[in-house]
Amino acid sequence: NLMEQDGDKDRLNAAKEEAENAYKIKFPPMRFGQDNRKIVAISKENKITSSLTSIKGFGKDIGNNMFDLAQIQHNNFVDLLVYTINSNVFSSKFENLIKINYFEQFGNNKKLLAFFKEFTKGKYRYNKKLKDKTKQLRLVELHNIFNNIENKRLNFNSQLDAEKEILGYLQS
């Protein structure tokens, strides 16, 4: 927690590696629905959950926002993204979170990345400034697009590259 507060993320990652190797402490992957606002020790399970703040370029807001989002029922990834746009908590960091499988409960990361690009830059991109009728038409199209993308993962090498780049360590 002190290293995280100091902002020394390289030193924090080195400490994680040492804890895993020397003390067999597990650091489960960060996932949507976990409380990743801060580092938390679960001593009974010999685990430490990481915080989103430990990722380079991520501030405290993203952890708080993801925790708050997880408290609200979202039926699917489309609804989650629409909610974030409409409630002003959408973040450019979502793409990196998708790459590290943070939103795994909604689908595999290759599928979610393809959809995220369509949602943000495609023909049927969504934003809250659209008229209500246009929003409804786009939502129908976006749901169809999401449902028609094959549920695949990034290939293993791409996954490892993404984790190393984003997290500074490998979690797969």
Image (cartoon, helix red, strand yellow):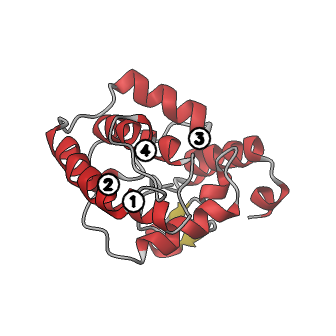
Residue assigned mark 2: 134
Mark 2 crowdedness (10 Å alpha carbons): few <14, some 14-19, many ≥20: few
Instruction: Kindly identify which residue carries mark 4.
Output: 98
Which class describes the residues within 10 Å of circle 1: few (<14), some (14-19), or many (20+)? few
* Residue 123, horizontal then vertical, whole percent: 34, 35
Q: Amino acid at mark 1?
A: Lys
How many tags in the picture? 4
Q: Residues within 10 Å of mark 3 (few under 14, many from 20)?
A: many
* Residue drawn at 80 percent across, 52 percent down: 7
Mark 4 or mark 2, which has the lower sequence index? 4
The disc label shown at residue 131, or none: 1
Amino acid at the residue labelled 2:
Thr
Of circles 1 and 4, the one toward us is: 1
Q: CA distance from mark 1 to mark 3?
A: 38 Å
Q: Are marks 2 and 1 in contact (CB under 8 Å)?
A: yes
Precedes in sequence: disc 3 or disc 4:
4
Return the residue nearer the eye: 89 or 156: 89
In the image, residue 19 lies at what x, y percent? 62, 52
Distance Cα–Cα, label 2 vs label 3: 38 Å
Drawn side of residue 78 relative to residue 19, left or right: left
